[in-house]
Image (cartoon, rainbow, N blue to C red):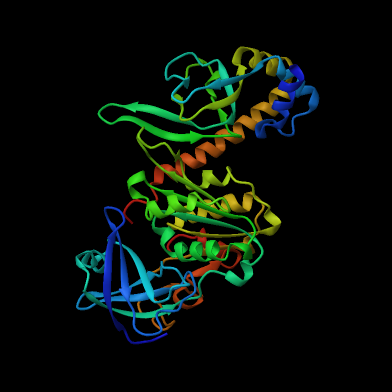
Amino acid sequence: MMEDLERLLREHDFLKGLSPEHTRLLVSCAKNVRFASGDFLLREGAAANTFFLIRVGHVALEVGVPARGVVQMETVGPGDVLGLSWLIPPYRSHLDARAVEPVVALAFDGTCLRGKMAADHELGFWLALRLFEKAHARLERVRLQRIDVYGAP
Amino acid sequence: MTWIPEPARVLRVHQETADTFTLHFDVKTGGCRFTPGQFNMVYLFGVGEVPISISGDPSEPEALVHTIRAVGTVTTAMKSVKRGSTLGIRGPYGNGWPIEEALGKDIIVVAGGLGIAPLRSLVYLLLNRRSDFGAVTILVGARSPADIVYRAEIERWRRRADATILVTVDHAGRDWTGEVGVVTALLDRVPIQADRTIAMTCGPEVMMRFTTRALVARGVPSERIFLALERNMKCALRFCGHCQYRETFVCKDGPVLRLDRIEQLLWQREI
């Protein structure tokens, strides 16, 4: 069972390149989870203590806008990460994350993961750098979205 | 190719989105033979002439198709064109997409907004001659679900098992069940064998800058990335200089240009 979970961790894009020792360290924080279409993985304002690695399906990141209803900001899918707020105090989600189809993911306990990162700085640096790369890529996408390139010239 | 506009009768007008429409023309004997990526100068008599990409199927040259977005004086006036109207057509001009170079290679097509129009004829060719190419991936981005040009046709393409077609929109409500995010995010969703890939992109210039950067980051060499530029073309014959992109005349040397030959210019403002 633990070996299966370790294999799933090794196969996910986000953890590719992590040493086998460090991958094994993360197994104790992880579980394989499933969500039905319409289920929420994260809720805006709620405690954020889970970090997801999406394996199957798509998740919509949404925010409720008064008078406009729910606006989808972005969708994430297989190979993507979901949730960064578990790493940053006060550990509250800033968006809703809703499964738009059946989703399978690896879910890491945030407290457990922070503990591992603090105890092993090499692991902590590796994970922090990968998360920064993901945040940087998302920032780049948000910039392009913000420019509204398809609007009137 | 002709220097004088030939009268062409409109057979059909199809409204694609709120501001974008497609004109189907009846062209005389021999039709309008073209290479995907080429454009015609389309003349609304008494108003003006504009360069418009050819969006039809290159294997059906008798059916000349142009998709137009109403943004300027001439294209806005073209909204009043109806079935039976006559417009002037001269062309085709420009170089078109590098079909010969693409034979046998994996193809990635990235279209943003109305950038799908000059790429549609290429997509027809890729799908019609599917066995001539490796993996075919078509990535389409639009502002919102209501702004997706050729939406029904793209849905039909998506049902094909021999090509990967992904669509995303920048903004959507909950009624949209597809991908949301910028078109460059789709590049992360697809496998790329950089050493055998050729990429072709068209869309707003800033979108192409982000796209080419993402392609290069995935290992695709800049000499195998092609983009179609849009410029203010008047003569389309390399005389007037309106479309000049430093030493490049987009009307004649382009509109399809290889990234490594222009990438320094792409980052300069006001060129």
> Is residue A117 left or right of A138 when viewed as pictured?
right
Q: Quadrant of the N terminus of chain B?
A: bottom left
Q: Position of residue B203 (x, y in %)?
A: 44, 57
Q: Is residue B77 above or below residue B17?
A: below
Q: Position of residue A15 (x, y in %)?
A: 69, 30
Q: Nearer the viewer, residue A145 or B101?
A: B101
Residue at screen point 71% across, 19% down: A26
The front one of A45 and B139 is B139
Q: Quadrant of the C terminus of chain B?
A: bottom left
Residue found at x 55% / y 39% = A137
**Compared to A83, does B69 lie above or below?**
below
Q: Residue at x 70, y 16 (%)?
A: A116
Going by the picture, which residue comes out furthest to the right? A21
* Snapshot quadrant of residue B173: top left
User: Which of A131 and B181 lies nearest the eye of the viewer?
Assistant: B181
Q: Quadrant of residue A104?
A: top right
Tell me where residue A7 sits by quadrant: top right
Please provide percent x and percent y for residue B260. Answer: 61, 64
Residue A52 drawn above or below residue A152: above
In the rendered view, would you say A53 is above or below B56?
Answer: above
Tell me how many marks there are. 0
Q: What is the x, y in percent for residue B261? A: 59, 68
Is residue B131 among the parts visible in the rendering?
yes
Regarding residue B232, the answer to whether it shows in the image is no
Q: Is residue A150 left or right of residue A86?
A: left
Task: Indicate left or right for B149 with A12 as reference.
Answer: left
